[in-house]
Image (cartoon, helix red, strand yellow):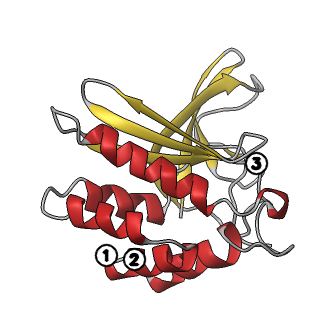
Amino acid sequence: MGEGIFGNIVKGPVHQLVDAVVNDPARRAGFLAGVRSADTSDQYCTHLRTNGLDPRHADYLRQWWYNQGPEGFWPWLQPIYPILKRGLIKAIEVADVAPVLSLDSYWSPGGTQVQVFVTRSRYQVTRIILTPATPPPTTLRTKEAPLWVVRRGSSSLKPGDVTGPARDEVVEAVDGTVITWRIWDF
């Protein structure tokens, strides 16, 4: 099974690219037109590649996210591409309402189905893709992500401890049993 995440929220390389392109005023309209015309997940992955996505990340989407066979993520929910496409289009449309705002996208494997949440504040539009869990990742995360999680944990933890099923959380602070972790990414 492919490289998933375990119980957190991430902004992976695909989200980083989509947000960068959408947040570039010179590229937004063209990118949106390409998403709208991408009738298949393969066409969408090709569109992402023409906008700068590393071929390995496009292959990851094809192999794990959009694969409708038993070896892909969530075969019982496939096809998921129409949901994700419509969610991205909606997020860009919401960001385009005056005043035009930036887009900030994330993925969290904490649901029972594939859903896209789009919310608009005065400062940005946030898009969150919620999916069922994936198999735990096999690649060690080594880079701090701009994400934190605060939840209950063991009072025996101390700052600097690396925890989590995927060893992707570093303890930043301990206040009794309330722990603040910094999330690590690829």
Considering only vertical position in the picture, is 179 above or below 5?
Answer: above
Q: Label 3's element?
A: loop
| Residue beneath disc 2 | 47
Q: Seen from this angle, which residue lies furthest left? A: 26
Foreground: disc 3 or disc 2: 2
Q: Which quarter of the figure has residue 59?
A: bottom right
Badge 1 density bin: few <14, some 14–19, many ≥20, Cα 10 Å: some
What numbered label is drawn on residue 74? none
Q: Which amino acid, mark 1?
A: Asn
Q: Are marks 3 and 2 in contact (CB under 8 Å)?
A: no
Considering only vertical position in the picture, is 84 above or below 60?
Answer: above
| Residue beneath disc 3 | 132
Q: Which quarter of the figure has residue 177?
A: top right
Disc 3 to disc 1, how far (Cα)?
Answer: 28 Å
| Coordinates of residue 140 in the picture (x, y in percent) | 65, 65
Q: Does label 3 or label 1 sit earlier along the sequence?
A: 1
**64 sits to left or right of 71:** left
Q: Which amino acid, mark 3?
A: Pro
| Residue beneath disc 1 | 51
Q: In front here: 72 or 42?
A: 42
